Image (tube, rainbow, N blue to C red):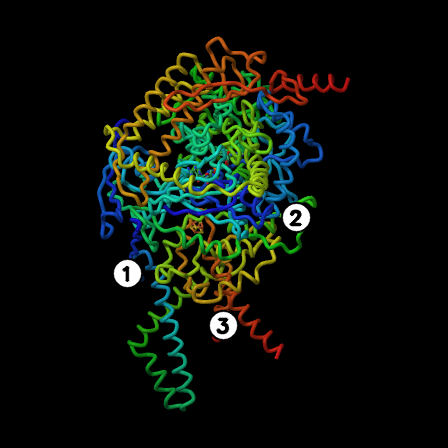
Amino acid sequence: MADRDRLTIELWILRYRPAQDEEPHFVSYTVTYTEEMSVLEALQSIKDEQDGSLSFRWSCRMAICGSCGMMIDGTPKLACSTFLRDLAPGPVKIAPLENFPIERDLVVTVADFVKKIESIYPFIMPKETKPVEAGEYLQTPAQMAAYEPFSDCINCMLCYAACPQFGANPDFIGPGAMALLQRYNGDSRDAGSRERLDLIHGEDGVWSCTAVGLCSEACPKLVDPANAVNQNKTNSAFDFFLRGLRKENHS
Amino acid sequence: MDHFDTDILILGAGGAGLRAAIAAAEAAPDQRVALVSKVYPMRSHTVAAEGGSAGVVQAHDTLDDHFNDTVSGGDWLCEQDVVEYFVSHCTREMIQLEHWGCPWSRKPDGHVNVRAFGGMKIERTWFAADRSGFHILHTLFQTSTKYKSIERFDEYFCVDLLVENGRAQGAVLLCLATGEFCAITARAVVLATGGAGRVFRQNTNGGIVTGDGMALAFRHGVPLRDMEFVQYHPTCMPGSGVLFTEGCRGEGAFLLNKDGYRYLQDYGLGPAEPQPRNKYMELGPRDRLSQAFWQEERKGRTVTTPQGEAAVLLDLRHLGRKRIEERLPLICELARHFMGIDPVDTPIPVRPAVHYTMGGILVGIDTASPLPGLYAAGECSSIGIHGANRLGSNSLAELSVFGRVAGEQAAAFAKGAAAAEIPALLDRARAAEARALGLLNGKGGGERHSVLRKEMADSLEKGCGIYRLGDEMQQACDRLADLRHRYDGITIDDKSRAWNTDWISALELGYQLDVAQAMAHSAIARKESRGAHQRLDGYTQRDDANYLRHSLAHYRKGASPEISYSPVTITRSPPGQRAYGALGEQLEHARKEATHG
Amino acid sequence: MSERRPYVRRQSRLWWASRTYRGYTLRELSGVGVAVYGAVLLAGLDSVRRGPDAYAAFVGWLSTPVAIVLHLVLLAAMLLHGLTWFQTLPKTMPRLIVGGQAVPQKTITNAAIGLAMLCSLALVIGALS
Ligand SMILES: Cc1cc2nc3c(=O)[nH]c(=O)nc-3n(C[C@H](O)[C@H](O)[C@H](O)COP(=O)(O)OP(=O)(O)OC[C@H]3O[C@@H](n4cnc5c(N)ncnc54)[C@H](O)[C@@H]3O)c2cc1C
Ligand code: SF4
Ligand code: FES
């Protein structure tokens, strides 16, 4: 027990400081760790005790705020719920999330992702508006089950880091935003599917996806974003076809 | 320095800030709203709330019951007019959230379901599995994107408020990505910056919960009210402090000591029945449960975790796999992943950790602070509904109810207010920038802020924990004064500007020290025991004659805060004995008889 | 001018060859196998059109070692592709809710594979009888 408490592990951390570095490079740190220590706690101990200049995002420590995504030994993970005991003996390679520009150290650019979320009308467009006084909309557990998993997305962007097509085309709307889109399209209270579908027809929409499927494997919340994307390829294709038919009817 | 002018400035984009922004945008579509947050809105700590949010819906429940639970739960230190307004607006807000898409858990017939929560007589906690705060926050964030008048400043850190001519008129922000400053001038300012639990060592709070807004208002002369009341949550992960929601107990979990005994029955919460009744046993209020843990630990009846922490056991086994996995998925994930324990067949070791700051920025029922133009809502504020102890699920409801009020009030104030006095404000902004840069570039004496932070957290935990002693509180006060002093001489390793989290943490520590001082000094001045403030040094009883009053901490530059008191508004519930379990029921019965007879 | 200077990492041109994407790359390659087999079938059909001599030559080629090895490889590719196809299937359809609960994706995949095997079996039996 006493021995186990004094284990050490080496972390290779990709560092990039725009004020002084031309490009990112790995720096090695060694930390003492215990059984239950997460990668996030290791980074915190480095920052507190060895090198205050190491930058990374974190907050909740419980895998719900979505801040702490990073590449850990090449796989996108939440640092707060990845444990050193599973990575021992090391050395462990830690890098910022793949496919995103690096702002500094383990901090990547999030703004473009948030813009994608905002672009897909991420709110209920009600079928029938009713005043609050009239009470809640009814929704059975089965109706909820149709969209609920998609609403569990914590916006951690791990799925984007796992997606080679996003790597090739940064404008691809990508798995996380599509999960959110499907969360609303699948909601029995919503009537905005048409408008949302119009946003995703092109190459930057669903059609960049080649069904690699690793996004769903990377997802820490079992959201299954690949399902959201691929369902909407079907929807997009149908819509395209139906639209053609409708046009012919008009002429 | 960049400068933006706006009408309504909202600092903080958690539940309260987002709700305020939406309310302002709806109340005054022609006004511009600037919404500032040091993290992306969906990272705000509201995201971590698990259990749920209160609102009376069941036919056999009444607003009176919610009122009484809240006021007695707060040990009568509540503003009763505010509580009355609060309970009568909760349900409306919960339905509003439903209309915006919040996936509340449902009954088979499609109506919203409610669960039991500690200290609540009747089930009235709306929940979205055990991710209630997460869903509320994401729903509010996503809905807020609908309003074109809301302009967000994500990952901007507020370093100071801009106050001119006795009126709050803006703030100075540090852009994390660039390390450059900007000033926002406004006609009205809302603070919604959340709590301050990180000043303690073991806590359930996220890293960003550092009391920034409290300290900002405090430094500009707004009193912090009731800061001695800090809530310990009884069921947290030993070591990290990560929370296991009260929803566990709402679903029927037991708390056992090392002998497998439901020890709460020894502390006036019994009788122990297989299915705990509301306000009995495991469904008692948080302060009582945390205190009972403390006693058990003294009696040597707790278990010891591998990390060497004392703990009791949260037992879910009798609920069965299906119910546990369906109602408490996050709890399963936390226990399995973080502790390697499957709650389906093993009880989870838990212990109390700091969870919530009942006190905060003094505001009235309209969320206005004494500083004209400054409003506050959410955990950073003290509007008076929580008193000496908050009931679980009243806080998420508070965000919604008073977030809306703050947005509407700020919009109304902005409409009538004169334009911001820009040149004078920009001078102040430059001064604030110089101060922040001084901290960054100052040579200092070589001490790191992480050392100070640790000492602060240790001393508060020791001096202002579950039970308090005069001399220990005094030590905490002295220690904090010393830390305040040493803070002026810290050295920051990192001198760069872009994404300098070393610098941000140091700025946050400055806020934390102010808040910690307000807590410790308010605590030592209150010579009684009430709610979450329990003393063992001769002041073990509640003392209504002298202390049925709110404490107010006033900032003094370079010195410790001054404490004064203000009266409590009592409209219809005279202070009574606060009791739970069988005794609680007897007393309530007697009270009812008295009012009916 | 601020210090900010986001660093963009270039995606490697050989990303598909990395271990992470091996499964995907194999699946896509097996697609080529399916296409090749389609071409073989088409060639067979074409030989029928061109007359009995051509058809006999085609059948003769089928029994050469090269053709047998090729068919084994193509069979493996077909099986792999079929399997991954069925694994992808549940990802392309809306969540199937039965009795208020979502049907697990594995169940859908297994059911589809079962169905495909039944059909193949029926075909084989039909062809033999
Ligand atoms: C683990 C946990 C579980 C909980 N469960 C429940 C529950 O079940 N029911 C319940 O009713 N309550 C619960 N609570 C309490 C409740 O969640 C919080 O009180 C509430 O969410 C606080 O919301 P807020 O909007 O006031 O602040 P927060 O959500 O903390 O938001 C604060 C905002 O202010 C911003 N900010 C802070 N400082 C600055 C600065 N200097 N510059 C710029 N921006 C800044 C932050 O970025 C953030 O956007 C729980 C709390 C915790 C910790
Ligand atoms: S879908 Fe999953 S991996 Fe992608 S952002 Fe959401 S939670 Fe993260
Ligand atoms: S710190 Fe919040 S998800 Fe890891």
Determine whether B576 is above or below C90 in the image. Answer: above
Badge 1 density bin: few <14, some 14–19, many ≥20, Cα 10 Å: few
Tell me the distance, in whole angstroms, between the alpha carbons under discs 2 and 1.
50 Å
Kindly state the secondary structure of the residue where label 3 is placed.
helix
Residue furthest right in the image: B597
Q: Which residue is mark 2?
A: A138
Residue type (three-letter) at the residue carrying disc 1: Ser
Kindly state the secondary structure of the residue where label 1 is placed.
loop
Residue type (three-letter) at the residue carrying disc 3: Leu
- Mark 3 or 1, which is nearer the eye? 1
Q: Is residue C27 left or right of residue B467?
A: left
Q: Which residue is mark 1?
A: C12
Residue B388 picture location, percent across and down: 54, 22
- Mark 2 or 3, which is nearer the eye? 2
Report the chain holding disc 2. A
Tell me the distance, in whole angstroms, between the alpha carbons under discs 3 and 1.
45 Å
Quadrant containing the N terminus of chain B is top left
Residue B117 picture location, percent across and down: 58, 30
Q: Which residue is mark 3?
A: C123
In front: C118, or B377?
B377
